[in-house]
Image: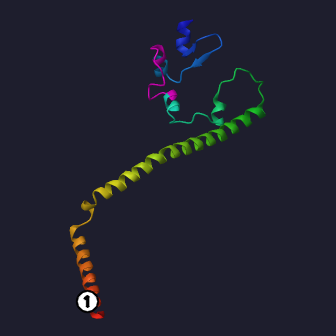
Amino acid sequence: IDRFRSVLQIKSRTIEKMFRFCRSRCHKFFQKKRNPRTARWTKAFRKAAGKELKVDPSLEFEKRRNEPVKYNSKLWQNTVKAIKRIEEIKTRRQNHFIINRLKKGRELRKEADKKEVEKNIHLIKSPAAGLKQRKQMVEVVMERDVDNMELN
């Protein structure tokens, strides 16, 4: 029986609880008694770290159900249509979640760029530009002094 289970990659801890592995790599990880939340490539880690959607009603449809349903062609067609629509909704929500997650990094990079520009402005701004401004300021001050002297 153990050999049969490993071929199907299904484990049962107790009589009630059976679970499937998404890939052989996860099954090997389980056999080594490693915690899946510590490995960055597992779905458990990605959900625990907040990198993927955890709670979403569209994910509930993927759960396995053990109740057999009598075949009905109308029901089958409606189900296939619903699956396509659910998949669209799920991808849209996942994309929206990822974009929101990456906004924070984009803002941090912008702030870091601004700080770097303020810190290294001397590399961007030419020294000659400062000289021209100083000359203009001196001329303006001289004109004010001359105007003040004429009024007095």
Between 64 and 145, the residue placed more toward the observer is: 145
Mark 1, residue position: 146
Q: Residue at x 47, y 45 (%)?
A: 102
**130 to the left or right of 77:** left
Q: Residue at x 27, y 78 (%)?
A: 137
Q: How is the image coloured?
A: rainbow
* Residue most extreme to the front: 152
Region in magenta = 29-44
For badge 1, the amino acid type reads Val
Dominant SS type (magenta): loop
Q: Position of residue 135 (x, y in %)?
A: 23, 78
Q: Residue at 48%, 25% (x, y): give it.
A: 37
Magenta stretch containing residue 128, yes or no? no
Residue with the most extreme top position: 1
Question: Residue 71, image x and y in percent?
Answer: 76, 26
Callout 1 secondary element: helix
The picture places residue 6, in percent across and down from the top left corner, at 52, 12
Q: Nearer the viewer, residue 87 or 60?
A: 60
Q: Quadrant of the C terminus?
A: bottom left
Please tell me how crowded label 1 is: few (under 14), some (14-19), or many (20+) other residues with Cα within 10 Å.
few
Is 143 left, or right, of 92 in this rendering?
left
**Which quarter of the rendered picture does the N terminus lie within?**
top right
On screen, residue 48 above or below 33 = below
Which residue lies at the image location 46% right of the left edge and 21% below the top edge?
A: 25
Could you say which quadrant of the image residue 39 lies in? top left
Identify whether 83 is placed above or below 144. above
Residue 91: name its quadrant. top right
- Front in this rendered view, residue 81 or 64: 64
Residue 1 versus residue 72: which sits nearer the camera? 1
Q: Picture coordinates of residue 29 (x, y %)?
A: 46, 18
Q: Is residue 42 magenta?
A: yes
Task: Left or right? Give the position of 81 relative to 19.
Answer: right
